[in-house]
Amino acid sequence: MRRVVTISVDAIAHRVRKRLGLEPSIRVAADEVLELHPGDVGETPPPFSLPRQIERAREAVHLSTLKFELERAITRRIQHAPTYAFRFRRATMIDGVVYANGARQQQVAERERWRPRWLDAPEIDRAALASSVIGDQFFGHVIADDSCAAYLGRELAPVCFTEGRRPRSAHAMRYLELYGLADVPRLRTAHLREAWLFQDFGMNGHKRARFRQLRERLRVIPPARSGHGVFFRRRGAGLPRGLMNEAAIEERLAREGYEIIDVARADADEIIRRTRDASVVCGVEGSALMHGLLCMREGGALVSLQPPYRFTMALRDHADAMGMRYGFVVGIGTRTRFEIDEDEVLSTLELAWGNVSDAGQRRDRAA
């Protein structure tokens, strides 16, 4: 692999084009566009909840709108977008941002340096770039969406992940190892003689199949139980969401026979082992719940405890794609702290047990 030294004006040139309204989309700029898998329409039951829960939602999660999230909370019919691949004969990646034919795709959640600069970077013959900005920010999207994109990309070229400034967590690295992706190289700045970028957000049939492949890979770790309930303890892990009475909810669920897992302290193998084949998983909304969707039994149910000022149905999409039911409880409070009534959590979990598809696996909670 040879290194090439050049001066790059890609960032500032893109900034000028954007201000002039001349910025092409990735689709328009690509040298080749492939529709790898068609879109389809999904019919799924809406999320389950107690009455009037969505009336407590005050704001949506960052980068979304409350109107959009509320619509997703009641809709039954979902149009899943196709999966596209875009090939570029030449591209440059600078600090995790890809420039090609006048278009730009950011793959890391960092402020871009737009001044001209010298680049001393390796030249890569071919690369399928599987990372995303949201994956750089949130663990759950690395072990789900970015990993799905990696399985897609290897059909076209050697897969590469993009290296951000945030180090990958031990949990993420273990999942990638189990998926067979631990050795995928990571790029930050490079000259690419051929680059593939993807549009892979639609939960179409092919992405659903790739989720099944990821779930199947985790089955090498045997389960500790089967058909049980799990509660993920956060206690401040990840982005602060401020569930003030989480300890009381945890103690109540422990008395009910739920497996209590501290996601900040347990390693990935322990989390997978104790979550594998669970029928119901519950916890504060966030990436930790992706452990549940990837590890629990098919046909299980996930319950998300939602801050009123971070309302989101993002995990509903993933639950539908993985064959799970999704429910939620919305708390009452401020932007930094909130509470959820214990009885409401228990009542919503009763709805979850009623929604588990295999009735014979619904009541192992106290085993």
Image (cartoon, rainbow, N blue to C red):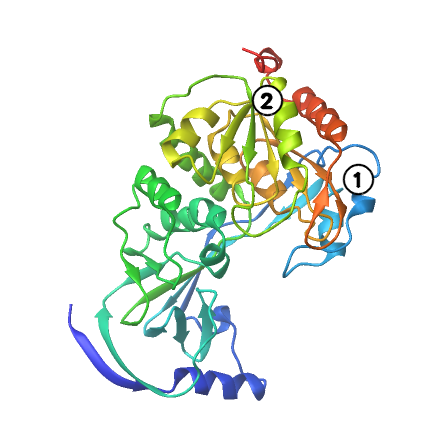
Q: Quadrant of residue 22?
A: bottom right
Pinpoint residue 358: horizontal percent, then vertical percent: 59, 17
In the displayed structure image, the side of residue 17 where residue 196 appears, left or right: left
Nearest the viewer among 263 and 129 is: 263
In the picture of the structure, the residue carrying the numbered disc 2 is 254
Foreground label between 2 and 1: 2
Q: Is residue 13 above or below residue 131?
A: below
The residue depicted at 76 percent of the width and 27 percent of the height is 343
Q: Secondary structure at mark 1?
A: loop
Query: For mark 2, does the 10 Å Cα neighbourhood hold few (<14), some (14 to 19), or many (20 or more) residues?
Result: some
Q: Position of residue 138 (x, y in %)?
A: 49, 52
Q: Position of residue 121 (x, y in %)?
A: 24, 74
Quadrant in which the C terminus is drawn = top right
Name the amino acid type tagged 1. Answer: Gln
The answer to whether residue 266 is seen in the rendering is yes
Q: CA distance from mark 2 to mark 1?
A: 25 Å
User: Is residue 31 visible from the viewing direction of this image?
Assistant: no
Q: Which mark is residue 347?
A: none
**249 sits to left or right of 171:** right
The residue shown at (61%, 47%) is 314
Residue 53's label in the rendered image is 1
